[in-house]
Amino acid sequence: MMLELQWSDWLALFGHFMVLSLLSVGGAITTAPDMHRYLVDGQHWLTDPQFNASVAIAQAAPGPNVLFVALMGWHVGLNAGGPMLGLFGVFVTMLGIMLPSTTLTYLAASWGHRNRNLRWVRAFKQGMAPIVIALLIATGWILASANFRSLSDWQVPLLAAVTAAIVWRTRLHLLWLLGAGALLGWFGLV
């Protein structure tokens, strides 16, 4: 597939990914249907196999799942004229998907830090703390439940409770606890 993209096309691609960045609550993968609509169905810059391969390869590879956006940009650039345009496509799509959300996050965090003494900012942070803790506990439960098959497997919840108590009551660095857990697993104790 050979495309002829003008600067206005590259700018439109950049702008589209900037808009998607602000809509990607839950990660860039949540906007994949609209990426498909735009890149495959609307502009015909990618084929279905290229789109699917971009998502599949990035999801299978280690690292952040946003890398599928880079692969889509790579394919658009390759279709437009070769490896150099492929690199340009990676730059355009990744900058487009990352710039708005990271800028918004930075500005919100800076504003929150500057205004941390306001009553409603403190209330918001205190209200979010139990939610974050609950999400961490739920994640820990899901990860531990793979090894916790019955009530007779008492070691897993006991180890989780001991670890939580150590984290809560001491200043011991988490890497030491991870190392201890790895050693316990190595020796088959957990």
Image (cartoon, rainbow, N blue to C red):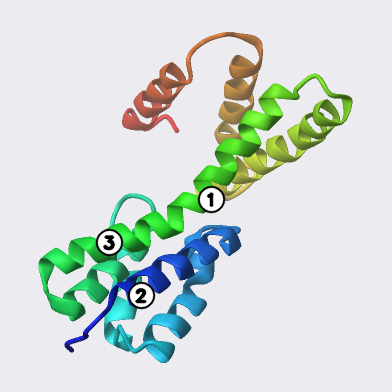
User: Along the line of sight, which residue is nearer the eye, 125 or 145?
Assistant: 125
User: What's the residue at 17%, 74% (across, down)?
Assistant: 78
User: Along the line of sight, which residue is nearer the eye, 176 or 68?
Assistant: 68
Q: Residues within 10 Å of mark 3 (few under 14, many from 20)?
A: many
Determine contact: label 2, label 3, CB under 8 Å.
no
Q: Position of residue 40 (x, y in %)?
A: 37, 86
User: What's the residue at 45%, 33% (across, down)?
Assistant: 190
Marks 2/3: CA–CA distance: 17 Å
* Helix, strand or loop under label 3: helix
User: What's the residue at 67%, 43% (across, down)?
Assistant: 135
Name the residue carrying label 3: 90
Name the residue carrying label 2: 8
Determine contact: label 3, label 1, CB under 8 Å.
no
Which of the 4 image quadrants contains residue 154? Answer: top right
Sequence-earlier tag: 2 or 3? 2
Which of the 4 image quadrants contains residue 38? Answer: bottom left
Which labelled disc corresponds to residue 101?
1
The disc labelled 1 sits on which kind of residue?
Ser
Sequence-earlier tag: 3 or 1? 3
Left or right of residue 146: residue 10? left
